[in-house]
Every structure is written in structure tokens, then in C-alpha cells.
Amino acid sequence: MFQYKIDEEVSLALPRPKIDAKAIYDLIDASRKELSQWLMWSVDMKNVADEERALVRNLENFGKGDSVTTIILFNEQPAGAISFNRFLKLDNSTEIGYWLATKFVGKGIM
């Protein structure tokens, strides 16, 4: 698995759909109330299969060079995700989006 270490507690990893889907779905489900205020997709995430499909799409977009999404790991446990989207060659910019599960808020991760 590709993993980029930020510090002793935080790292970023490319998603592994079959392996990571359940853990990520469980985080979304437990944080749905908070996430749904800002991220409309969280309302549509109904089960682990939905999350697995989303992770596959993330990897497909990465393969096409359209975006890169990584799982945020805190002490080797999934805590959320961060994505870099819409790479613009005109000014070398991108859009950054992230979400963090409620139980990981306030731990200095972001």
C-alpha cells in the first residue's frame, strides 16, 4: 500500500477498495449528522458497497490524472479522507476537499 507519513501519528494512503470500504463506511455512518451539513454525498452513502464503488471511482480518477484521494490515517487507523481535485494547468492550482470522522476532530490532525 502506498503511504505517505506526515508525522508520528498522521499519514495518507491510497485507498484499497475491498480492504478499506467497511472501515471508511463505518466512519461516515457514525459521523453522518456532522458530515451531511457540508458534504451532500454522505447522505447518499447507504452501505459498504456504495463506499467500495466510491473508492474504485477515486482510483480511476487518479489513474486518469483527474484527482487524487487518500485516506487520512491516525495512528494507522482510518480517520477520514483528503482529495485534490480539478487540476488546472492554466495556473497550476487544484481544489482541496477533506472530511474527518467526528471522533477524530480536535486531535490536531488537520
Image: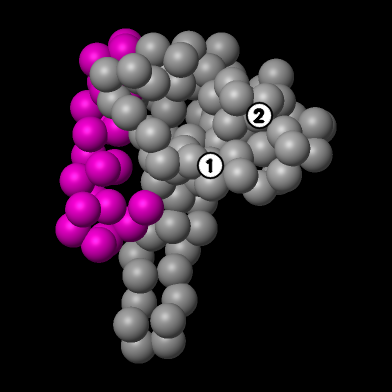
Q: Is residue 59 above or below residue 101?
A: below
Q: Which residues are magenta?
A: 46-68
**Residue topped by disc 1:** 12
| Quadrant position of residue 87 | bottom left
Instruction: Identify the image quadrant of the N terminus.
Output: top left
| Quadrant position of residue 35 | top right
Disc 1 element: strand
- Residue appearing at x 35%, y 88% in the figure: 90
- Is any part of residue 29 visible from this angle? no
**Magenta span: chief secondary structure:** helix
Q: Nearer the viewer, residue 110 or 20?
A: 20
- Residue appearing at x 41%, y 41% in the figure: 2
**Residue topped by disc 2:** 74
Q: Amino acid at mark 1?
A: Leu
Q: Is residue 16 above or below residue 87?
A: above
Reply yes or no: does residue 42 show up in magenta: no
Per the rendering, the mark at residue 109 is none
> x, y (%) of residue 17?
29, 25
Q: CA distance from mark 1 to mark 2?
A: 9 Å
Number of marks present in the image shown: 2
- Is 54 displayed left or right of 15 in the figure? left
Q: Amino acid at mark 2?
A: Phe
Q: Is residue 108 above or below residue 51?
A: below
